[in-house]
Amino acid sequence: MGRTDSLAKLAWAYGLHVARRRLTRPRSQLAKLVDTYERDGIRALTPEERELHPRLIGCINCGLCALAAGRLGRARLPDLASSYMRLYARLGDASSDVAGDVPDLEAASAACPVGLPLADVAAIVRRLAAG
Amino acid sequence: MSAPSAHDVCVIGGGVTGAGIARDLSLRGLSVLLLEKGDWGAGTSGSSTWMIHGGPRYLEFDWDTTRRSCEDAGHIVTIARHMVYRVAFLVPILPHDRNNIERMETAMEVYDRFQPLKKSNPHVRLTADEARQAEPGLTPDLIGAVTLEEWGVDPHRLVYANVQDAVAHGARALNHTRVTDVLRDAGKVIGVRYRSPDGSLSEARAKVVVNAAGPWVPEISRMVGTQVQLRPAKGIHLVYPHRISNFGLSAETVDGRDVLMVSHGGFTLLGTTDDDFYGDLDAVDVHEDEVDYLLQAFERVFPSIRQYRPVRTTTGVRPTLFKWRRYEDELSRRYQVIDHSADGAEGFVTIAGGKLSMYRLMAEETSDVVCRKLGHQAPCTTATQPLPGSESELEPAADLARRYGISALAAVKVQSRHGSRSADVLDETHLGRIVCRCEPLTESELAYAARHEQVRSLADAFRRVGLAAGPCAGGACVMRAAEVIGQQLGWSASQRFDAVREFVRGAWLGRAPVLGRSGWAQEELAQGALRGLR
């Protein structure tokens, strides 16, 4: 009975939905989506970032980049790749950690055994932290 | 054996339901003993999808379940506000999907009526291009997408917050304590016998014993000579130690089931499977074909998924109510409170079935039955009484970080676990050094967990404060973590060493099914660093 009732109500809702779609002109809702979730730190990656992303998250936390280049702002380099790059929704609350001086990221990448492009890691973390 | 302790109620099972019942009854003024054979939330609760959701899937079966689930989710979001966060899903529609975009949007329009109950936003509909702007990794075959909003939560912290509040209101709560027998006197249940972590046996007398053991409900029932039949269902998740996308995604499996990729605090859960389970509840394995089943589904909507490296798997067994001749996926997530007086077991109550999103309501209804049996009249207050840490607004993470000399990200993480009580945690030992850099976790929080949060092993610390939950899976931190915990608990050098060995062995079981090329490289590094522990 419960299932029959539920399916009947869904069928009615479907009829109304289809009628409404035919009578009204659809408008883009992308801006609404972006606005709604901006304050929760839910932000889209750019197509370029998406393409790179699988290569940016391979850190195995060996610490060799720290020996080669030190810190980005207040964040140690392995932390940048192993922690900040996890893309926390609240990354914006930690933007002060990654502001400031940029070390020699090319040297850090050269020392990385899994070849992490740390300049790209730094760029994406800073962009998302800045909001 | 020492003299038995005496309580109004003994609750067996320290998952979210048992912990919720202990909290509810304690707030009503009853004396409660809560017993858990493993760690808090280490069973079904911890291996869930980590979501407080309303359940749009139930709209096909029973709108009332959706309404009740959304209502209770709304209560949980209110009382646990420091530990919940929004999860915005993109539901991509592909050619040949079971539901076309009009049917899917209809379901979301109906679900929107319930969304305000849990303080969630209504859906939006996106064209294929728009959906790929929101998530460029979606397949070019896309027809369009709708969105769906739910809430994420760390179930381990949710369970522990309930335990913590129960204890604050007078309950006694013991983890790593296994019930070995239920005591009876002339048919009436009068208490339990239990084995403590040191191996000693004790007895506790209680006017009512509540069986909230999740999938272990039938095992406890057999101790009383009653029968509760479940249809246990196994579910696995893949865990990626970072957010793959800031949006959650859904996908359809080869057999037409819906599975989810859920973006949590700093990681992604991908799952779940749903299969009848007949094996040993204490040894549930993950098989490589289950991993492939999930990846196959997501590869269709998010083609680069196999380029990402899962760090481990989770597995658990749902305590689904028994029903004959239905596919596992169609089984109801309903629950049942059973008073076993009619079975000749006066003083014995079982709560079976249900799901994380309705734990508070399940606890309330079970507590109502217990109170009626005891003739105790006190209203339930768990829908409005905040959980520990959610009593007041959070201070800005950057301010907390400056005050304690830690990174702002570490402050964000401690707030996500302890909410408005974060300063108390950081005040405890003034150890601002980071012990787990991936998470990041301070030594002071870890020491606090060992001293005040019943952490007795590194695996307990993983659940309580996220130790070793990041990309390195503990390779860089478990030795130091054992030192910090050992200092608090008085472990000898060999006990610290044993704790690390036990953790490494346990973690391996969840990692082996998903180790790819980089995973093996990392495993080599970790094993090299910990050489001699095996």
Image (cartoon, rainbow, N blue to C red):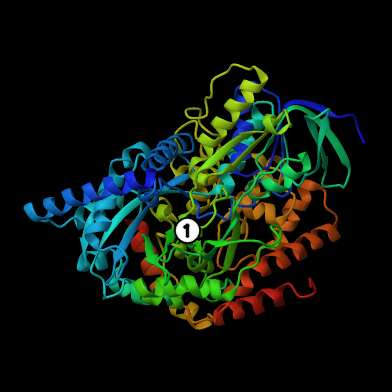
> Split into 4 quadrants, where in the image is the N terminus of chain A?
top left
Residue B468 on image: x %, y %: 62, 61
Report which quarter residue B13 is drawn in: top right
| SS at mark 1 in the image | helix
* Residue nearest the viewer, comparing B28 with B385: B28
The foreground one among A73 and B336 is B336
Residue B437, image x and y in percent? 58, 61
Q: Residue at x 76, y 75 (%)?
A: B531
Residue B21 lies, with reference to residue B61, above or below; the image says above
Q: Residue at x 70, y 62 (%)?
A: B283
Task: Characterize the local packing of mark 1: few (<14), some (14-19) or many (20 or more) Cα atoms within 10 angstroms.
Answer: some
Q: Nearer the viewer, residue B320 or B21?
A: B320
Mark 1 chain: B
Residue A5 seen in the current view: yes
- Indicate whether B288 appears above or below B332: below
Residue B220, image x, y percentages: 73, 44
Q: Taking B217 as reference, is B324 left or right?
A: left
* Residue visible at 53% across and 80% down in the picture: A112
Name the residue that disc number 1 marks: B329
- Residue at x-position 74% and y-position 32%: B345
Near-viewer residue (B193 or A65)? B193
Q: Position of residue B218 (x, y in %)?
A: 69, 47
Residue B493 drawn above or below residue B64: below
Count the numbered circles shown: 1
Q: Please state which amino acid type lies under the numbered disc 1.
A: Asp
Q: Tell me the quadrant of the picture where the C terminus of chain A can be found.
A: bottom left
Name, please, the residue furthest toward the right. B1
